[in-house]
Image (cartoon, rainbow, N blue to C red):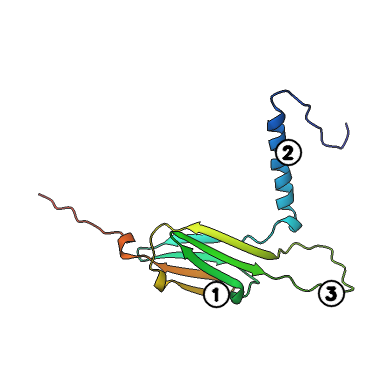
Amino acid sequence: MSSEMMKWPYLPGLGSFRDEMNKLFEGFTRRGSAAGMGVVPPLDVSETEENILVKVEVPGIEPKDIDISICGDTLTVKGEKKSEKEEKGKNYHFIERSYGSFSRSVGLPASVKFEQVKAEYKKGILEITLPKSEKSKIKKIPVKVS
């Protein structure tokens, strides 16, 4: 048996399915390689009674290169991780770190007080605190016993 991957035979009616599967696998291999990964910082969104808290991992990105905006109920974090200058005479064996621009948008689970939003950068983590507006806070209603 050959070491090459076996090719799927063409079957009428399954051609478009085969093409879509090929595109899917090509996408995995491109995204899985270090060159094609790009910068996609992971983020967490949590909520307390008073605030929505968003934490974004942005190590190696200067706070001045980060832009935070809110439009309606969507928070967007944009930035750029700049590449280091290549040094002449240096032969690279691996280049796995990613560089470039990114943009992450996330729907907020509640309305916020825009004027009170705070962002803090500490040890590569961007922490955004979004105070909830009064209409978004949970109001507890006591049940009377009769």
Q: Quadrant of residue 83?
A: bottom right
Q: Secondary structure at mark 2?
A: helix
Q: Amino acid at mark 3?
A: Glu
The picture places residue 89, in percent across and down from the top left corner, at 90, 73
Q: Secondary structure at mark 1?
A: strand
Q: Give the residue number, with chain letter if any, for mark 2.
A: 22
Q: Earlier in the sequence, mark 3 or mark 2?
A: 2
Could you give the CA–CA distance between mark 2 and mark 1, rounded to whole angstroms? 41 Å
The picture places residue 2, in percent across and down from the top left corner, at 88, 34
Q: Secondary structure at mark 3?
A: loop
Q: Give the residue number, with chain letter if any, for mark 3.
A: 87
Tag of residue 121: 1
Q: Amino acid at mark 1?
A: Tyr
Q: Nearer the viewer, residue 75 or 88?
A: 75
Q: Can you say whether 129 is above or below 146 in the image?
A: below
Could you give the CA–CA distance between mark 3 and mark 1, rounded to whole angstroms? 30 Å
Q: Residues within 10 Å of mark 2 (few under 14, many from 20)?
A: few
Q: Residues within 10 Å of mark 3 (few under 14, many from 20)?
A: few
Q: Residues within 10 Å of mark 1 (few under 14, many from 20)?
A: some
Q: Quadrant of residue 117?
A: bottom left
Q: Residue furthest top?
A: 12
